Amino acid sequence: MTYFILHKKESKENLMFSSNILGEESLGSFYPEQGWTALNNMIHKSPESLENYTILNEQGKKYTLTEFLDTVEKLKIR
């Protein structure tokens, strides 16, 4: 399962860019991408900006930040 982050002013066509890909879940592991780094920077430097973003998976299911982090927490980050 691949997870994405998308700014509310961006179109879904931008999901193909690596900066929008949080990472991929596979066989109990999470493989972070560039979007993971961006998310961590936002959490630590400007958490108020997170309300402008949506996290979703490849099937279009939306997650809150807490739901997403709870999912990733159970996985081994590679």
Image: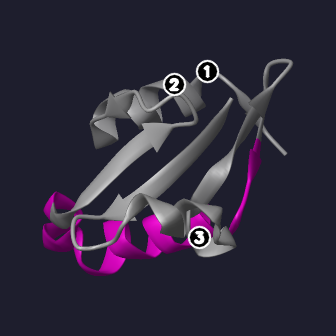
Nearest to the eye among marks 1 and 3: give it: 3
Where is residue 23 shown, x and y percent of the image?
A: 68, 49
Q: Residue at the location (52% across, 51% down)?
A: 4
Q: Residue at the location (59% across, 74% down)?
A: 19
User: Amino acid type of disc 1?
Assistant: Lys
Q: Is residue 56 left or right of residue 26?
A: left
Q: Which residue is mark 3?
A: 37
**Considering the numbered disc 2 on the image, is that residue within a helix, a strand or a loop?**
helix
**Considering the numbered disc 3 on the image, is that residue within a helix, a strand or a loop?**
helix
Q: Could you classify mark 1 by the number of other residues whose Cα lies within 10 Å: few (under 14), some (14-19), or many (20 or more)?
A: few
Q: Which residue is mark 2?
A: 71
Q: Pick whichever of labels 1 and 3 is earlier in the sequence.
A: 3
CA gap, disc 2 to disc 3?
17 Å
Q: Could you classify mark 3 by the number of other residues whose Cα lies within 10 Å: few (under 14), some (14-19), or many (20 or more)?
A: some
Where is residue 31 shown, x and y percent of the image?
A: 79, 46
Where is residue 33 shown, x and y percent of the image?
A: 71, 61
Q: Could you classify mark 2 by the number of other residues whose Cα lies within 10 Å: few (under 14), some (14-19), or many (20 or more)?
A: few
What residue range appears in magenta? 31-51
Q: Residue at the location (53% across, 27% down)?
A: 59
